[in-house]
Image (tube, rainbow, N blue to C red):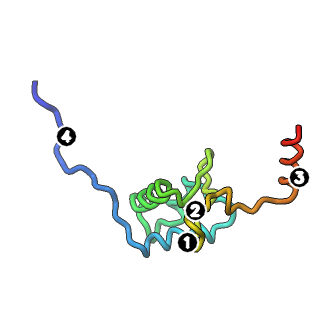
């Protein structure tokens, strides 16, 4: 039996520049609401290719600089000026109504 391996190069991870990363972040921050992952290509296509978008997104998820909910919405982006020890829970702005509601649940 012959070994049926595919010939060709193994795709290496896409390398991106700081300029591309900054463009990615500023575009997401300027977007109103919570942008969906599936819409990133429409937002970023003229300047970034799909493989670059995927590489940046993977890098940000692995370094915990971005949070994505189960529906595929980008719900949080870490700011550069914040302390590295702070998490999403530490930097979130929680309304007073939610705090009152949560404290009533805790009492039960």
Check disc 2 and report the residue beneath it: 85
Give the vertical position of 86 relative to 11 (above or below). Answer: below
Locate the N terminus and report the quarter of the image it occupies: top left
Q: Position of residue 51 (x, y in %)?
A: 39, 58
Estimate how packed mark 1 is, as few (under 14), some (14 to 19) or many (20 or more) residues with alpha carbons within 10 Å. few
How far apart in space, not on screen, are marks 4 and 3 (Cα)?
61 Å
Check disc 4 and report the residue beneath it: 6
How far apart in space, not on screen, are marks 2 and 1 (Cα)?
12 Å
For marks 2 and 1, the one nearer the N-term is: 1
How far apart in space, not on screen, are marks 1 and 3 (Cα)?
31 Å
Check disc 1 and report the residue beneath it: 80
How far apart in space, not on screen, are marks 4 and 1 (Cα)?
43 Å
For marks 2 and 4, the one nearer the N-term is: 4
Assign a secondary structure to mark 4: loop
For marks 4 and 3, the one nearer the N-term is: 4
How far apart in space, not on screen, are marks 2 and 3 (Cα)?
27 Å
Estimate how packed mark 4 is, as few (under 14), some (14 to 19) or many (20 or more) residues with alpha carbons within 10 Å. few
Q: Nearer the viewer, mark 2 or mark 1?
A: 2
Q: Position of residue 87 (x, y in %)?
A: 61, 58
The mark tally for this picture is 4
């Amino acid at each position: 039996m012959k070994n049926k391996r595919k010939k060709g190069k193994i795709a290496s991870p896409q390398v991106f520049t700081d300029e591309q990363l900054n463009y990615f972040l500023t575009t997401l921050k300027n977007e109103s609401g919570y942008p969906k992952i599936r819409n990133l290509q429409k937002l970023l296509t003229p300047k970034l290719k799909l493989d670059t978008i995927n590489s940046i997104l993977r890098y940000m998820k692995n370094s915990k600089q971005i949070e994505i909910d189960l529906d595929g919405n980008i719900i949080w982006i870490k700011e550069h000026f914040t302390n590295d020890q702070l998490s999403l829970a530490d930097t979130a702005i929680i309304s007073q109504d939610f705090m009152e509601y949560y404290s009533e649940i805790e009492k039960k």
